[in-house]
Image (spheres, rainbow, N blue to C red):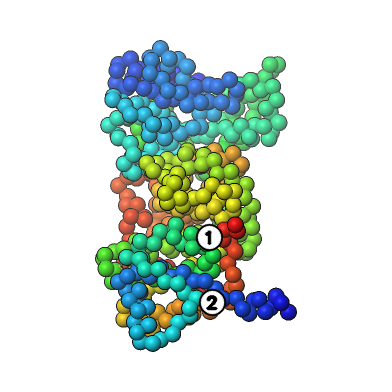
Amino acid sequence: MKQLSEILKEVAFGSLSSGEAEMVIGWQKGPFWWQSFPAFITDPGGTGSLIWDPFSVSNLSKYLLKEVPEKKIALFLKGCDALGFNQMLRDGRVDREKVLLFGIPCDGLVDPARVEAAGLSKGLLQVKKEQEELIFYYKKGQRKAPARDFYYAKCLSCRYPNPVIYDQMLGEAVPCQPVERFADVSKLETTPLEERFSYWSRHFSRCIRCFACRNVCPACSCRECIFDLAEPRWLGKANELSETQFYHITRAYHVAGRCVDCGECARICPVGIPLAELNRKFIKDINELYGEYDAGADLDKEAPLLTFKTDDPDVSSGS
Amino acid sequence: MPVNLKLQSFEPLIIAFCCNWCSYAGGDLAGTSRMTYPANVRVIRVPCSSRVSSNFILRAFQRGADGVVVAGCHPGDCHYTSGNYFARRRFLLLQRFLEFLGMEPERFQVHWISASEGNRFAAVMTETTDKIRALGPNRKLRDTR
Ligand code: SF4
Ligand code: SF4
Ligand code: SF4
Ligand code: FES
């Protein structure tokens, strides 16, 4: 990945020094091996600190909502980020003319939790990726392991590793070998009702309602979110299961038909609630009922909930 | 047998969101034709079935509804041409989602009832009430405070 890291610095420098872009959003290394933070750079001299490494996981396009550029903002998009960007475009939340997109083909990023679980994190200084392998650097010596063993769940089921939208692609397209993504949903669908209810209650009761899953989501770009409204106050503040249920049903329902399945919500959740299963239930049902649809993949395709057919399957009258 | 006694005396609360142009008028017709349907049903008039957002449905359950019904014009007959077609997709997804979370599918129903179907209105409400009564009180999305 070293090479790509160099190219990334070059194009960032180029777009700032030529004046085409007024800001570059990229990733920068934090003090620890697992930290690759979003970086906002306006001075061409600062582009040397930009990196691309196995931890460059955050989707940078959501930050576009916070910046109002006069010229353009340049940013880097991985495959999943590109789907999210497209959805924001479709929702009218970003201006295509105001961005300069550098696409990064990405075959997977490393979940620090898996490194820790494998007992490799003690004294770890740096992790690098070379071909299909990760190299773990310690004070004394190094270790190697197959990279795929450490990838995020969202990367293992990724279906669009190569960005679907970009101005310039920085690298060769990577092959894609996703694992089945609906397995967990299908399994839950066949468990008894009461078991399912307690499964979700167990998870929901751990939710601290930090809203990180909403904040990170490229489909959650509403100027005014229902969860922030004081009047009417749809979502209360109390630590009460029914409020959390309201939150989760509403969040997942609002992104139904727009969720690009980028996996960011599940990744960001501090308590590990399997949010992907909620989103994927909607995706699976939409695919089954109204035809295959991949949000963010094809902007010309009609969104399933913004249209209908007169012979759609009927709703249940409860029998 | 206090438990059984309590069960027998359980009367469900059912919230019915009825479209002004059809089902609400259907309910009216049932009334003026002197048909009876259970007093468990509380009707809330809405301009169209597509006006009913998930917020209304969830709030009803939170505040004590044992069942929620959305009733609208038959597909093809919506006063606003296509509202119920959009609603049909949204509600079907919501129904399947609530069931996925462990909610009994009977608790949230959607029916198409026209203004001339007073008898159907009464029949649907009676049948729904019986079903929900048999299921017992809903605790699943209820606010426990
Ligand atoms: S990120 Fe997790 S804890 Fe935070 S609101 Fe979402 S589900 Fe709840
Ligand atoms: S709901 Fe989650 S998976 Fe879907 S677009 Fe939002 S962050 Fe990505
Ligand atoms: S939760 Fe709903 S209202 Fe809030 S940002 Fe997401 S889509 Fe918008
Ligand atoms: S007006 Fe009755 S469903 Fe739309």
Q: Along the polypeptide, which appears first: circle 2 or circle 1?
A: 1
Quadrant hosting residue A152: top right
Q: Give the letter of the chain under mark 2.
A: B
Per the image, label 1 sits on a secondary structure element best described as: helix
* Residue A32 location (% of width, % of height): 60, 22
Disc 1 marks a residue whose amino acid type is Gln
Residue B132: x, y in percent? 54, 74
Measure the alpha-carbon separation of dots 2 and 1.
20 Å
Closer mark to the observer between disc 2 and disc 1: 1
Please tell me which residue is depicted at 51% across the width and 32% down the height of the picture: A57
Question: Badge 1: few (under 14), some or many (20 or more) residues near its Cα, within 10 Å?
Answer: many
Is residue A278 in view from this perspective?
Answer: no
Crowd rating for badge 2 (residues with CA inside 10 Å; few <14, some 14–19, many 20+): some
| Amino acid type, residue under disc 2 in the picture | Lys
Identify the residue at image location x=47%, y=38%: A216
Q: In screen coordinates, is A24 left or right of A236?
A: left
Is residue A71 or residue A150 the one in the foreground? A71
Q: Nearer the viewer, residue A249 or B13?
A: B13
Q: Residue furthest bottom?
A: B34
Residue B10's disc number? none
Question: What residue do we see at 38% from left, 37% from top?
Answer: A85
- Dot label at residue B62: 1
Q: Residue A72 sits in which quadrant?
A: top left
Q: Residue at x 38, y 15 (%)?
A: A43
- Which residue is denoted by mark 2 in the rendering? B131
Q: Chain of mark 1?
A: B
Locate residue A288, reporting x and y percent. Answer: 44, 60
Give how far across and how far down residue A202 sits, in percent: 64, 52
Secondary element at tag 2:
helix
